Image (tube, rainbow, N blue to C red):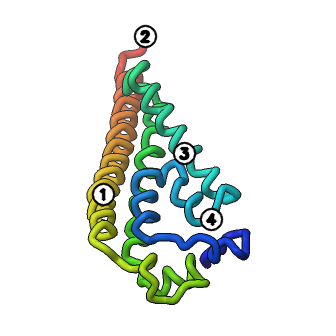
Amino acid sequence: MRRQPADPDHNKTMLKNKTIAAWLALLGGPLGLHRFYLYGLGDTIGWLLPIPTALGWYGVQRAQHLGLDDQTSWLLIPLLGFAIAAGALTAIVYGLMSPEKWGGGFNSSAAPDHSAGTTHWLTIGAVVCALLIGTTALMSSLAFSFQRYFEYQVEAARAISQTSSSPSK
């Protein structure tokens, strides 16, 4: 279900460009910039999006200062990657949306084939970049998370096996 802007005259005053929305989702998606562009500053989701981004960035900072053995950092770092991947996915969805669907969702007062909802080469560029950046961020986050988790499990198993195999007197 698509959320409509809170102001009923919002679409009448300013048409939303699909290309700009796709680039904002790609470059500023983790900060909610695309949501503010499309729905205005009153958008709750737009204000909540920076939270996992900031937590992920905090995890990166912790890992730089405390090392990769810090469990909190390897739990927080993937949040940054997932936020970047979510922004990239949103850019892909916006970029591939048909002009009619874009017009109905964001430019209801304009003609369905208005130029604000058409796909241009810059829109395709945003989709291609989103595929590259989003895939890299998602796969890196998953690989990092699973690697750290399995290393932690191996260390825990090694500690258990050393305590159970030591001769008791």
User: Is 153 rendered above or below residue 106?
Assistant: above
Crowding at label 2, few (<14), some or many (≥20) Cα neighbours within 10 Å?
Answer: few
Q: Amino acid at mark 2?
A: Lys
Mark 4 or 2: the one toward you: 4
Q: Between residues 144 and 33, which one lies in front from this camera angle?
A: 33
Q: Amino acid at mark 3?
A: Pro
Badge 4 is on which residue? 39
Residue 164 visible somewhere in the drawing: no
Q: Amino acid at mark 4?
A: Tyr
Mark 1 or 4: the one toward you: 4
Q: Between residues 91 and 5, which one lies in front from this camera angle?
A: 5
Q: Is residue 135 left or right of residue 42?
A: left
Give the mark nearer the N terminus: 2 vs 1.
1
Q: CA distance from mark 4 to mark 3?
A: 20 Å
Badge 1 is on which residue? 135
> Mark 1 falls on what kind of element?
helix
The structure residue drawn at horizontal position 35% and vertical position 23%, both measured from the top left corner, is 162
Q: CA distance from mark 2 to mark 1?
A: 55 Å
Q: CA distance from mark 2 to mark 3?
A: 51 Å
Give the mark nearer the N terminus: 1 vs 4.
4
Give residue 153's position: percent from left, percent from top: 39, 37
Badge 3 is on which residue? 52
The structure residue drawn at horizontal position 49% and vertical position 84%, both measured from the top left corner, is 101
Badge 2 is on which residue? 169
The structure residue drawn at horizontal position 43% and vertical position 35%, both measured from the top left corner, is 74
